Image (cartoon, helix red, strand yellow):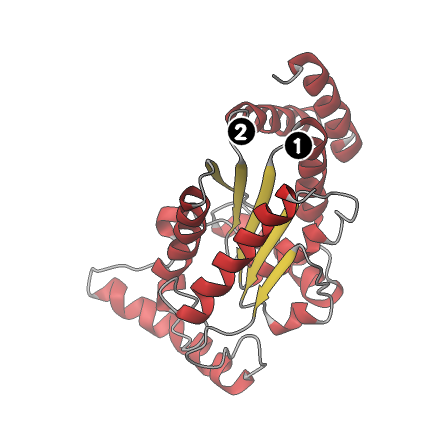
Amino acid sequence: MINEKALQNEASEIARELYGPRSGARTKFTGRLLELCKQVQDKDVLVIHNPGGWGSSRLDRCLEWERSIVEGVKSTVERLGYSPFITQYFRSGDSLWAHLRDSKDQVTAFFQGHYSQAKILAAELKLIDRHFDDLKVVMVGVSQGAGFTNAVMRQLDDVNDVYSIELGTLFLHLRHRRLTTHTLAIDGNGELPDPIVHRNLWLGTRVYTTAPLRWLKYQLMRKPRSFTRCIDLPGHDYNWDYPAVKQKIEVFIGNIFDSKSRR
């Protein structure tokens, strides 16, 4: 059992360091972290999904292939006889205003590799690692979420039980990426080259410039779709059914538990 009082005091101190006098932000951070700690008390693995794009899409609104990866990780952990808890970390709000507000952070991440939210999630994971000796954490990030996941991992050098699965990392993030034995980076789905990873600017530009027209078409047809669903980039999908994706992830997760048993 965790020491709830000690955990609350430590979470409050971390919130003070992160947010200073912003009492509302400190309260929100502490409450979310303590709730997460309660939810993983009887679990073996905490799976954190870092969504692609702006990082604000709930799992049921993500593309089918992105959902399939999270479900595949969950089923693999369960097949090995362990109990997972699935959660998401949102690095932006889900509104136009939130996206505009966070655009500076996105640009900074592209060119410098730093996300302000990465420091926050890293602080949470360090606390969890200190208080849960037998809990393993697996972060799953796709596209821009993969870049964010790696930014978090770069702040966790002294944490042993946090791992990451990073799929389709945007080429702008590659120069900042650091890979260790705790990270599985998949830069291709085994079916087609990923234009987002391999800097196929012509194809990327064509797809993103036609996406608004596709979005408008569905609006006029009264069959609205999210903007994300109007972006069709062949090769930038990592469906769990692709052998090159599934097999690599299954081996990686299996090795996590094998290395733990050998300690």
14 w.r.t. 1: above or below: below
- The relative height of residue 194 versus residue 248 in the rendered view (above or below) is below
Determine the secondary structure under disc 2: loop
Q: Nearer the viewer, residue 252 or 13?
A: 252
Residue type marked 2:
Val
Direction from residue 237 to residue 112 in the image, left or right: right
Residue toward you, 185 or 95:
185
Q: Which residue is mark 2?
A: 40
- Sort mark 2 into few (<14), some (14-19) or many (20+) by Cα contacts within 10 Å: some
Disc on res. 128: 1
Q: Residue at x 79, y 44 (%)?
A: 158
Percent position of residue 80, x then y: 45, 45
> In the image, 122: left or right of 83?
right
Residue 236 is labelled as none
Q: Amino acid at mark 1?
A: Ile
Bin the neighbour count of mark 1 within 10 Å (Cα to Cα): few under 14, some 14-19, many 20 and up: many
Instruction: Give coordinates of residue 121: x percent, y percent.
Output: 66, 41
* Image quadrant in which you'd find residue 246: bottom left
Q: Are marks 2 and 1 in contact (CB under 8 Å)?
A: yes
Sequence order check, earlier mark of 2 and 1: 2
SS of the residue under disc 1? helix
